[in-house]
Image (cartoon, grey):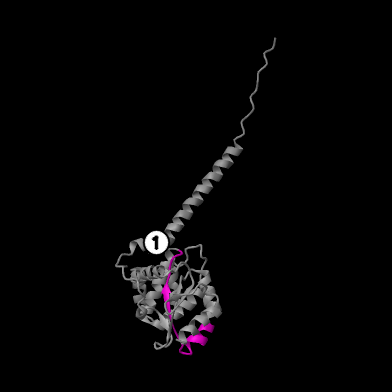
Amino acid sequence: MTERKTVGKKKDYTMPIIITGIIIVFLAFAVIVKLQHSSELKGLPNYTQIKGDFTKLDIDYDKQPHKGDAAAKVKVVEFADFKCPMCKKWEEQFMDKFQKDFIDTGKVQLYFMNYAFIDRDSILAASAGEAIAKQNNDKFWEYYTKLFANQGDEKEIWATQKFILNFVKKNISGIDYNQFEKDLKNNTYGYDVKLDYKIAGHLGVNGTPQLMVNGKLLPNAFDYNAIKAAIEQELAK
């Protein structure tokens, strides 16, 4: 009798190889993303690293970037984050009108305060604004307008040291750039930014943009009629 030999099926390793390849590609991508994120965060300040006395939580108007007649009866404060898309929208939609209606007419003096809360590069963008304002108040407003015009994605880290240094060099003239670079890299005005944040929170600010008229927070920065009414009420006193 002839013995029958059983021949086993040859194993197919194609699928395991494909799966292994996919895993390797995924892990490599994850490492690249992590390294890129670490590179983006390099040089960005963190509120926990900024030390100082934050017990006095009253607005020192003299230290804030401002525009308008110092003798104006009404003080309006804008709280904003340079990464906030709604802040950009407010600037584009209302700033020119607000300027003509209230600032140019001598009715209002407008102040700016940082409420940098979206991410760590919000703090850096705010610190850059403070550094410019300390050199030249008018140049701060140029930075304000142009940075909003060049605003990146809210969900991405875009206001890095590299970006801001290049942006200011190309767009903001009439300042001591070397001093600005030194201030940005040393986070010279990080305390001022954190103090703004603390003061704003103490006053009830919980998002951006928000406006305050003679010490009273308005519920909706996009209701121009309500802004106008609040200002006119103060002017009538």
Quadrant containing the C terminus in the rendered view: bottom left
Instruction: Find the residue positioned furthest to the top.
Output: 1
Indicate the quadrant where residue 181 lies: bottom left
Q: Residue 19 at x, y = what percent?
A: 57, 41
In the rendered image, residue 1 lying in the magenta stretch gets the answer: no
**Residue at the extreme left of the image, as rendered:** 53
Which type of secondary structure does the marked residue at label 1 adopt?
A: loop
- The x and y percentages for residue 47 are 37, 63
- Crowding around mark 1 (Cα neighbors within 10 Å: few <14, some 14 to 19, many 20+) is few
| Residue found farthest to the right | 1
Up-down: is 55 above or below 27? Answer: below
Q: Nearer the viewer, residue 128 or 95?
A: 95
Image x and y of residue 18, in percent: 58, 42
Residue 176 % position (x, y): 36, 80
For this orientation, the residue located farthest to the front is 237
Q: Is residue 33 visible?
A: yes
The residue shown at (66%, 18%) is: 5
Q: Where is residue 225, by image quadrant?
A: bottom right
Q: Nearer the viewer, residue 106 or 193?
A: 106
Can you see residue 95?
A: no
Q: Is residue 229 above or below residue 50?
A: below
Q: Range of the magenta residues? A: 95-118
Which quadrant: the N terminus? top right
Count of marks, rendered view = 1
In this view, 101 is above or below 143: below
Q: Amino acid at mark 1?
A: Lys
Q: Is residue 18 left or right of residue 179?
A: right
Identify the residue at image location x=47%, y=66%: 158
Q: Is residue 108 magenta?
A: yes
Name the residue beneath numbered marker 1: 42
